[in-house]
Amino acid sequence: MEAILPGSTIGVLGGGQLGRMLAFEAKRMGYKVVTLDPVPNSPCGQIADKQIVAEFDDFDAAFKLAEMCDVITYEFENVNVEIVEALEEENRLYPRSHVLRITQNRLQEKEFVRNIGIGVVDFCRVECSEDVESGYRKVGLPAILKTVHGGYDGKGQVVVESEEDLKRLNIKGQTLIWEKKVPFIKELSVVCARDVRGNVVTYPVSENIHRENILDMSIIPARISKEIENRAKEVAETIAVKLDIVGVFCVEMFLLKDGRIFVNEIAPRPHNSGHYTINACVTSQFEQQLRAVCGLPLGSTKLLSPAAMVNILGEGRGNSLTGVDELLQDPDISFHFYGKKEAMARRKMGHITVLADSVEEAIKKAEQKRKQLKWV
Ligand code: AMP
């Protein structure tokens, strides 16, 4: 298949920050970008050559995007899968819809991972009160009940620690997944890319710290043994092949005390825990996504420096961020801001990446320096 070369146009379904960072790389490499998002002047739309303002289930708008583009990708996994299916019949679009079908559904995703011989936490499907009984018997407590569709950053999740919590549960005919809550010692993720020819590259393993279910800090390289690092990468590489994915994706994992690794989630797109690659790797995850979907050779994933990335979240009490000038007095900090108007509480507004000689130093700096930023 011929490569899609600079000068061509990339279509991006979704106009959020991931699309924005993809668009920056695309523009740098000489591509044009068209994005589709219902919110005018979206983070990606601000960088793209054109934004089609339309809902994600608008077939006509999606076909209009396809007419303007040489290849299409998406920047969030809850895009309309029927639209993706319709578009991929006549257009180059990656990752393909079969990947979305699996990753949009937590149950299918976990079954897929288990079926290819990779560890997942114990789980079962729950649809009614009787299923709660059997979930209790089969999987036990403590548990997390998660929605099968559409949950991210901990949305749609209920923690069930005790039988008392269980009694208070009210399941009204929605399909949920009953998952064993595991005492992990670390959360890890691996960003991985596979091209149209089947070549696979993995980035260094990231160690992730979540606060209130939202990614707070990523530390790279993760503070784990070489053996665990290799196994985590192998998990991602196996998923790449078995999922037959083309594009960048991320596998989130739990590491247990006894060395077991359980896959929690697969995101079929660049990932928040891979933002450090912009500053700390030869090829960023966004450039890699372009290379993969355009049929170009994949780039080096080499880590150039230990790094820590922290998210800047909105707090719901002001939309202006102060302290950026003080922050940037440190020459090893890179500041990224997504151009969102309203800094609602918990909304991802930007991030900073700190490069340092050691991860310990990067973590310390990231924690200290972030305090200089204040919403007013
Ligand atoms: P998720 O929406 O599945 O990505 O979950 C968000 C966060 O909740 C994860 O990053 C973990 O910190 C926590 N979590 C999710 N599932 C489990 C589990 N089975 N056991 C323990 N913690 C979990």
Image: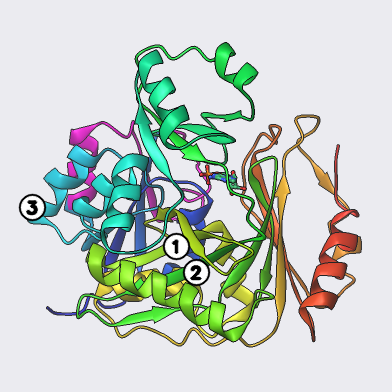
Regarding mark 3 in the picture, which secondary structure is present there? helix
Looking at mark 1, is its residue's CB closer than 8 Å to ligand 1?
no
Specify the quadrant of the image occupied by residue 198: bottom left
Specify the quadrant of the image occupied by residue 288: bottom left
Judging by the rendered image, the residue that carries numbered circle 2 is: 190
Stretch of the chain drawn in magenta: 39-66
Q: Is residue 134 above or below residue 232?
A: above
Give the label, 2 or 3, closer to the camera: 2
Give x and y (percent) for residue 332: 80, 77
Give the residue type that dot 1 points to.
Cys
- Does residue 278 show up? yes
Give the residue type that dot 2 points to.
Val
Residues under labels 1 and 2: Cα distance? 6 Å
- Badge 1 crowding class, 10 Å Cα cut-off, few under 14, some 14 to 19, many 20 or more, is many
Regarding mark 2 in the picture, which secondary structure is present there? strand
Q: Quadrant of the N terminus?
A: bottom left
Judging by the rendered image, the residue that carries numbered circle 1 is: 250
Residue 89 badge: 3
Q: Quadrant of the C terminus?
A: top right
